[in-house]
Amino acid sequence: PIQCEYYALEGLSQLLGSVERVRAGPNPKLNVLGVVLTMVDRRNRLSEAVSKDVRAVMGTQVFDTTIPRNVRLSEAPSHGLPALLYDIKCPGSLAYMALARELLARQTPPDARRAA
């Protein structure tokens, strides 16, 4: 996950450097399955700029699904509940369910998808 904020871009750069160091040493098979953009606010130009930059660097590794900035998601932990139990119909919960479907689709071999 990467928040659509400026400093998150710096963190992504550092994370990718760490992944490369691990690949060069103890785990050459290490892979990044994907990147999900979180706390996306479509009204905010910074969110759009960060999204564009991440997609330019990471390409198809960025999930199509994004997680919007959502008050109900923020409230859920204070009630001791996961977002889906707190409000399953809020935009954030719906986005997380869409992300789960997308993640599962990436994990399913293409031959198995055609057979289903």
Image (cartoon, grey):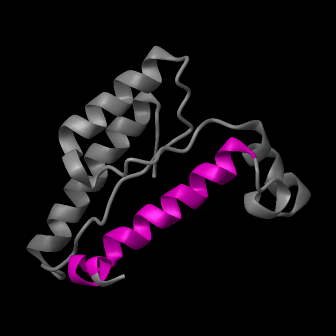
State the image coordinates of residue 38 (x, y, percent, origin top left).
52, 43
Q: Quadrant of the C terminus?
A: bottom left
Is residue 79 or residue 24 the one in the foreground? 79
Residue drawn at x 55%, y 44% as measured from the top left: 67
Residue drawn at x 20%, y 45% as measured from the top left: 59
State the image coordinates of residue 83 (x, y, percent, origin top left).
75, 57
Total of numbered circles in the picture?
0
Q: Residue furthest front?
A: 115
Seen in the picture, residue 71 relative to 18 is either above or below; the reply is above
Task: Answer whether residue 96 is magenta in the image.
Answer: yes
Q: Is residue 73 left or right of residue 64?
A: right
Is residue 71 or residue 10 the one in the foreground? 71
Is residue 37 or residue 5 the one in the foreground? 37
Q: Is residue 12 left or right of residue 81?
A: left
Seen in the picture, residue 105 relative to 116 is either above or below; the reply is above
Residue drawn at x 52%, y 17% as measured from the top left: 44
Is residue 114 or residue 59 the one in the foreground? 114
Residue drawn at x 45%, y 15% as measured from the top left: 45
State the image coordinates of residue 30 (x, y, percent, origin top left).
21, 75
Q: Quadrant of residue 15?
A: bottom left
Q: Is residue 108 left or right of residue 102?
A: left
Magenta-tinted stretch: 90-114
Q: Quadrant of residue 19?
A: bottom left
Q: Main secondary structure of the magenta part?
A: helix
Q: Quadrant of residue 34?
A: bottom left
Task: Answer whether residue 86 is magenta in the image.
Answer: no
State the image coordinates of residue 53 (x, y, percent, origin top left).
27, 31
